Image (cartoon, rainbow, N blue to C red):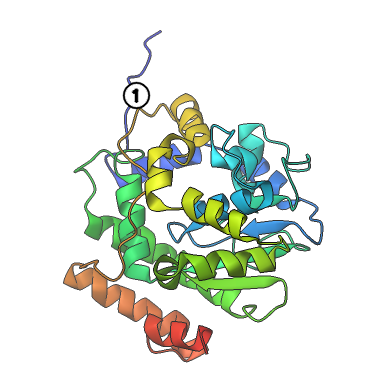
């Protein structure tokens, strides 16, 4: 019997096939049955919009700086993948409140807890997602940004649907909606808002610890704990992806510097018009953020 050589996707069809091997619908569904406690916290932004950063902030606040873990998603589990990874979502965690990660929209996510959702402009979220996938799931140079954007990111409509679903609940007492761009400008204010929301008393020492442990330099220094070690091992076993990857979740999140191909930008703008402007009334992302901060 010949063992197939590990390989990354060289087409979107192969990418879909590879990702389909990671977990079954039954495994995915188990996470959706999670019974939440009122003080449980789910961090549920759209992908590449500050999720890992917020996981680290919440975990640091509730433990006063614990770093005794191999993967942040072992101590702040990812709801959708937990069953495939053998993680018991119902188990007690290192400290309270219990915290979880998700990328689900409001309609799908388990109900009954508290929710932190950070939003990010679509161009930067798309660019960050493409760079993250390339080198892990995608063979570098095989799928262009334009193809990935048009046939995957934009075609799925998931970015805009996620945004609209959570926007409708932005003022709920158990929802904290944040703006990624502002998170990067004032991390002190971010940590204070998160601590208050999850009911963790914040003193000067804990603020200093959290600022340090959630800084770009600190997370880059410990990036092996924030780069999906559990999911990478699963992908190598189940989807036969090559070991080792230069794809990293710890990147300096650039704000508004993403230059898209003209055809991609036109389609991004059109999807915003169809799915956000016509339903919520906001002409663009900046206008929506202004309302969030109003």
Of 51 and 278, the residue lying toward us: 51
Q: Looking at the rendering, in which quadrant would you find the N terminus?
A: top left
Res 84 quadrant in image: top right
Of 3 and 218, the residue lying toward us: 218
The percent position of residue 128, horizontal first and vertical second, equals 34, 56
The percent position of residue 71, horizontal first and vertical second, equals 54, 36
Residue carrying label 1: 6
Residue 138 visible, this angle: yes
Of 15 and 180, the residue lying toward us: 180
Q: Residue reaching furthest front?
A: 204
Q: Which residue is rendered at x = 43% and y = 45% of the image? A: 219
Give the SS element for disc 1: loop
Left or right: residue 109 versus residue 39 is left
Q: Is 282 above or below relative to 240?
A: below
The percent position of residue 18, horizontal first and vertical second, equals 42, 37
Res 192 quadrant in image: bottom right
């Amino acid at each position: 019997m010949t063992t197939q050589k590990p390989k990354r996707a060289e087409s979107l069809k192969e990418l879909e096939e590879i990702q389909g091997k990671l977990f079954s619908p039954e495994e995915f569904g188990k996470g959706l049955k999670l019974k939440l406690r009122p003080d449980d916290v789910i961090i549920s932004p759209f992908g590449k919009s500050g999720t890992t950063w917020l996981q680290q902030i919440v975990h640091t606040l509730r433990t006063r700086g614990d770093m005794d873990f191999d993967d942040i998603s072992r101590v702040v589990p990812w709801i959708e993948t937990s069953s495939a990874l053998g993680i018991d979502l119902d188990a007690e965690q290192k400290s309270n409140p219990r915290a979880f990660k998700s990328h689900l929209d409001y309609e799908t996510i388990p109900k009954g807890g508290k929710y932190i959702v950070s939003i990010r402009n679509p161009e930067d979220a798309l660019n960050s997602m493409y760079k993250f996938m390339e080198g892990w799931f995608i063979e570098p140079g095989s799928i262009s940004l334009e193809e990935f954007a048009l046939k995957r990111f934009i075609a799925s409509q998931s970015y805009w649907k996620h945004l609209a679903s959570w926007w409708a609940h932005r003022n709920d007492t158990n929802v904290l909606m944040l703006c990624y761009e502002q998170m990067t400008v004032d991390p002190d204010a971010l940590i204070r808002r998160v601590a208050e929301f999850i009911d963790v008393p914040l003193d000067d020492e804990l603020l200093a610890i959290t600022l340090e442990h959630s800084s770009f330099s600190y997370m880059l220094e410990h990036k092996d704990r924030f780069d999906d070690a559990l999911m990478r091992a699963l992908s190598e076993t189940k989807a036969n992806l090559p070991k080792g990857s230069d794809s990293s979740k710890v990147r300096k999140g650039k704000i508004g510097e993403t230059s898209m191909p003209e055809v991609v930008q036109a389609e991004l703008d059109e999807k915003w018009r169809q799915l956000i402007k016509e339903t919520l009334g906001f002409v663009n992302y900046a206008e929506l953020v202004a309302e969030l901060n109003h």
